[in-house]
Image (spheres, rainbow, N blue to C red):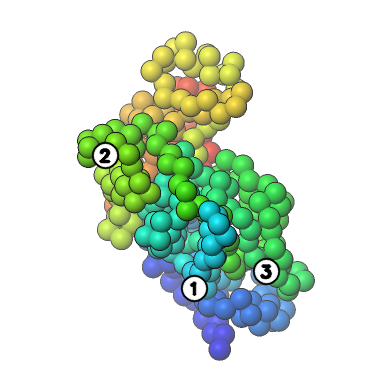
C-alpha cells in the first residue's frame, strides 16, 4: 500500500546530512506505485524531487513539495555469447551492482567502484570515474512518464549523454522517473587502467596482468584514501565538475601555469577542478561548520551542523577564487534545492 508522509526530515536521506523537511514524502518499491501516486491531482501540480541515495544534492531550505524516494530493488542478468546484459532496479545501491558484476566476472563497470548513489541516478548524471562513464556500458532504461503515466524505454541515443549530463537533466528534466536500468557488459574484459593512479597502485601491489576484481579493489582503495565516508562526514563526493575549455583558453592558462593538470578531450581540454581549487589555497580549509576535505579539494564536507546555505556560500567563494586566478568558472556537479 502506498504511504504518503508529511513533514519528514530529510537528514538521513541526503549524504550531506542536511536537516530540512519535505512537505510530502513517499517511498516507491514497485513501478506500479507511481501510477497510484500520480492519480492524485495535487501531486501532478506541486514541485517534486526524485531521490535514491541522496548523494548528489544539497538542500538549502525546507522543500515545499513532494520527495519521491525510489527504492525499487532487484538485479538480474542474461548472457549472449560474450555479451552480458544486466538489469537493475532504480533503488539498488550502485556499488552493490558493481560488486555483483565484478564477482560474476562481468567486465565494464569495475572502474566505477564505490561511487555513491543509486542505480536510478546513474544515467541522469552519466556518472564517471577513472576513464569510464556510464554511457560506455549503458544499454537502455525504463522510465515512467509523469504526464502520460506510461513506461517508456530510452536507448543510449535517446539519453543524449554528455559529460555529467543527459536528457533527463536537460530537455526532459522532471518529466520522467527512471525505474530500471539495463547495462551491456562483457565476459571478455577490456581492462582500462589509463588513469595513472590505477596503474601506480597495481604496480605497488605487484600486479602485472590485472583482472576485473583487481581493478575494482584498486579503484576502491584509491577512493577510500581520497574521499571521506558520508556515514561519518557529510559530503556529496565531487562537488564541482572538471571544467572543459577550448584549446586557446587552455594555452593562456598553460603559459602562466605550466603544471596545470589537464586531459585532452577531442579538440578541447579538461582541467582538474581539484587542482585548480587546491592552487587557490582551499584544500583542507575549514570555514565555520563546512570546508574542503583534507585529501581532496574537490570534495566539500559538513563537519557537523552545517546548513545547506552555509555550504552553498562556501562553494560560491571557491568559484569566485578560481575564476579570479585562472579565468575559469567552475560549475557545481551537485543539484541545489
Q: Residue at x 47, y 22 (%)?
A: 326
Q: Which element carries disc 1, helix, strand or loop?
A: loop
273 up-or-down from 311: above or below: above
Q: Residue at x 56, y 89 (%)?
A: 1
User: Comparing marks 3 and 2, which lies closer to the viewer?
Assistant: 2
Looking at the rendered structure, which numbered label has been put on residue 144? 3
278 up-or-down from 299: above or below: above
Q: Nearer the viewer, residue 262 or 102?
A: 102
| Mark 1 vs mark 2, CA separation in Å | 35 Å
Q: Residue furthest right?
A: 148
Q: Residue furthest bottom?
A: 1
Q: In the rendered view of the protein, which quadrant contains the C terminus?
A: bottom right
58 up-or-down from 245: above or below: below
Q: Could you tell which of marks 1 and 2 lies nearer the N-terminus?
A: 1
Q: Which element carries disc 2, helix, strand or loop?
A: loop
Could you say where residue 52 lies in the image, as x and y percent from the top left?
49, 65
Q: Nearer the viewer, residue 42 or 299?
A: 299
Q: Could you tell which of marks 3 and 1 lies nearer the N-terminus?
A: 1
| Mark 3 vs mark 2, CA separation in Å | 45 Å
Q: Which residue is mark 2?
A: 207
Q: How many marks?
A: 3
Could you say where residue 90 lies in the image, as x and y percent from the top left?
53, 66
Could you say where residue 40 lies in the image, as x and y percent from the top left?
69, 81
Q: Is residue 239 visible?
A: no
User: Comparing marks 3 and 1, which lies closer to the viewer?
Assistant: 1
Could you say where residue 239 lies in the image, as x and y percent from the top left?
44, 44
Amino acid at each position: 500500500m502506498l504511504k504518503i508522509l508529511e513533514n519528514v526530515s530529510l537528514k538521513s536521506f541526503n549524504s550531506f546530512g542536511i536537516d530540512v523537511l519535505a512537505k510530502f514524502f513517499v517511498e516507491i518499491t514497485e513501478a506500479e506505485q507511481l501510477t497510484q501516486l500520480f492519480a492524485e491531482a495535487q501531486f501532478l501540480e506541486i514541485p517534486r524531487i526524485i531521490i535514491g541515495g541522496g548523494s548528489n544534492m544539497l538542500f538549502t531550505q525546507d522543500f515545499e513539495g513532494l520527495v519521491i524516494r525510489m527504492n525499487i530493488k532487484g538485479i538480474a542478468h542474461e548472457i549472449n555469447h560474450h555479451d552480458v546484459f544486466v538489469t537493475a532496479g532504480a533503488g539498488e545501491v550502485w556499488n552493490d551492482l558493481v560488486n555483483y558484476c565484478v564477482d560474476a566476472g562481468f567486465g565494464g563497470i569495475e572502474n566505477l567502484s564505490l561511487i555513491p548513489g543509486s542505480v536510478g541516478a546513474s544515467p541522469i548524471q552519466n556518472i564517471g570515474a577513472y576513464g569510464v562513464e556510464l554511457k560506455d556500458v549503458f544499454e537502455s532504461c525504463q522510465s515512467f512518464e509523469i504526464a502520460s503515466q506510461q513506461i517508456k524505454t530510452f536507448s543510449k541515443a535517446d539519453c543524449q549523454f554528455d559529460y555529467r549530463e543527459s536528457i533527463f537533466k536537460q530537455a526532459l528534466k522532471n518529466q520522467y522517473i527512471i525505474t530500471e536500468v539495463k547495462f551491456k557488459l562483457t565476459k571478455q574484459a577490456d581492462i582500462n587502467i589509463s588513469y595513472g593512479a590505477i596503474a601506480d597502485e597495481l604496480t605497488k601491489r605487484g600486479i602485472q596482468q590485472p583482472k576485473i576484481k583487481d581493478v575494482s579493489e584498486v579503484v576502491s582503495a584509491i577512493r577510500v584514501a581520497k574521499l571521506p565516508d558520508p556515514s561519518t562526514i557529510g559530503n556529496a563526493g565531487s562537488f564541482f565538475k572538471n571544467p572543459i575549455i577550448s584549446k586557446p583558453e587552455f594555452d593562456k592558462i598553460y603559459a602562466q601555469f605550466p603544471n596545470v593538470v589537464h586531459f585532452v578531450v577531442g579538440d578541447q581540454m579538461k582541467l582538474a577542478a581539484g587542482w585548480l581549487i587546491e592552487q587557490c589555497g582551499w584544500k583542507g580549509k575549514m570555514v565555520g561548520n563546512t570546508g574542503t576535505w583534507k585529501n581532496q579539494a574537490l570534495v566539500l564536507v559538513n563537519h557537523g551542523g552545517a546548513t545547506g546555505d552555509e555550504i552553498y556560500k562556501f562553494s560560491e567563494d571557491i568559484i569566485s577564487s578560481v575564476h579570479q586566478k585562472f579565468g575559469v568558472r567552475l560549475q557545481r556537479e551537485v543539484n541545489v534545492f
